[in-house]
Image (cartoon, helix red, strand yellow):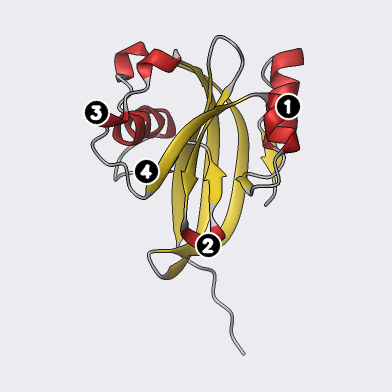
Amino acid sequence: MTTSTPPLREAARAIVLDAEDRLLLLRYDENGGFWATPGGSLEDGEDYATATLRELHEELGIDEKTVELGAQLAERSKDHLVGGREVRQVEKYFLTRVSAADVDPARASQPDNIREHRWWTLAELRATSETVYPHGLADLVSGVLAHGAPTRPVVLTG
């Protein structure tokens, strides 16, 4: 029996905080419904930082000029289905801060299957029974708020 590694899909994701340290998450209905950080796959020739800014505009209508992209906080690798085919997705998570007023889904050019966006406090994130990806997000954000960005990206699972 031979096993093959699924094709690589590189993705950039944003951990978006506002001035009140609330975290912006997006809700999707597929796979039983879940919340996740904004982001998506890299386009040909694109680096992670550029992809992160593009995705914020495409999904949430955020003007790239208003975004100050911070450090890479984390990385996650996960095999899952995208468009009906299995891929090995490698995601890099970057910190950014925006104002809630900067988010305008009416300006989004590719909202994909996003059902809603919501700003979460850390307490709400820790208390929810809803599925949130990546696992460990509340601990990651809590650590960043208390101690600053990690010296090396944290490896997330799940």
**Among the two numbered marks 3 and 2 on one chain, the one whose residue lies closer to the N terminus:** 2
Considering the numbered disc 4 on the image, is that residue within a helix, a strand or a loop? loop
Point out the frontmost of discs 1 and 3.
1
What separation in Å lies between label 3 and label 2 (alpha carbons)? 27 Å
Disc 2 + disc 4, Cβ < 8 Å: no
Type of amino acid under label 3:
Arg
Which one is closest to the eye, mark 2 or mark 4? 2
Amino acid under disc 2: Asn
Residue located at (49% from left, 44% from top): 27
Of label 2 and label 1, which has the lower sequence position?
Answer: 2
Kind of residue at disc 4: Leu
3 or 4: tag closer to the N-terminus: 4
Residue 124 screen position, x and y as percent: 69, 30
Label 1 Cα crowd, 10 Å radius (few <14 / some 14-19 / many 20+): few
Image quarter of residue 146: top right
Task: List the residue tagged with mark 4.
Answer: 42
**Residues marked 1 and 3 touching at CB (< 8 Å):** no
Q: Secondary structure at mark 3?
A: helix
Disc 2 from disc 1: Cα separation: 25 Å
Q: Earlier in the sequence, mark 1 or mark 3?
A: 3
For the residues marked 2 and 4, what is the alpha-carbon distance in whole angstroms? 23 Å
For discs 3 and 4, the disc positioned in front in the rendered view? 3
Q: Residue at x 53, y 62 (%)?
A: 31
Q: Quadrant of the N terminus?
A: bottom right
**SS at mark 2?**
helix
Identify which residue is drawn at 37% across, 27% down: 53
Q: Residues within 10 Å of mark 4 (few under 14, many from 20)?
A: many
The CA span between labels 3 and 4 is 21 Å
Q: Which residue is mark 1?
A: 123
Which residue is found at the position 52% from the left and 37% from the top?
37
Q: Amino acid at mark 1?
A: Ala
Placement of 70 over or under 42, stated as above or below: above
